[in-house]
Image (spheres, rainbow, N blue to C red):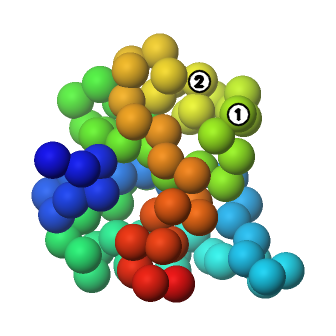
Amino acid sequence: QSALDAGTRICFTGTVTRNGNRIERSSLEALAASAGMQPVSSVTKKGCDALVTADTSSMSGKTKKARDLGLPIIDAETFLEQFGL
């Protein structure tokens, strides 16, 4: 099972830009929901299965917590490529 399968509780962090255009978090969450994932607002042990981030080397609170919990941390480009974007 991939971290980007339907049913995954997914959290987003960071400012995602592509081709110089900012992609709003609400748009990312809508994409995730359209694929059957469940967008969540925070990284918790029982409420989040994976984190999508603009910068996988970030030391943001969400990224650090995902690392500490051993959750998959997915680069935003990889997430967008799942949708052929």
Q: Which residue appears at 31% of the width and 40% of the height?
A: 48
Is residue 20 rendered to the left or right of residue 18?
Answer: right
Residue type at tag 2 = Lys
The residue positioned farthest toward the top in the image shown: 68
x and y percent of residue 40 in the render? 35, 53
Q: Which residue is mark 1?
A: 57
Q: Nearer the viewer, residue 30 or 77?
A: 77
- In what element is the residue under mark 1? loop
Q: Which residue is mark 2?
A: 64
Q: Would you call the spot at circle 2 few (<14 residues within 10 Å), some (14-19), or many (20 or more)?
A: some
Q: Nearer the viewer, mark 2 or mark 1?
A: 1
Q: Which residue appears at 72% of the width and 61% of the height?
A: 15
Q: Nearer the viewer, residue 43 or 75?
A: 75
Q: Is residue 17 above or below residue 4?
A: below
* Disc 2 to disc 1: CB gap under 8 Å: no
Q: Which residue appears at 52% of the width and 84% of the height?
A: 85
Mark 2 or 1 closer to N-term? 1
Q: Is residue 25 above or below residue 49?
A: below
Residue 37's image quarter? bottom left
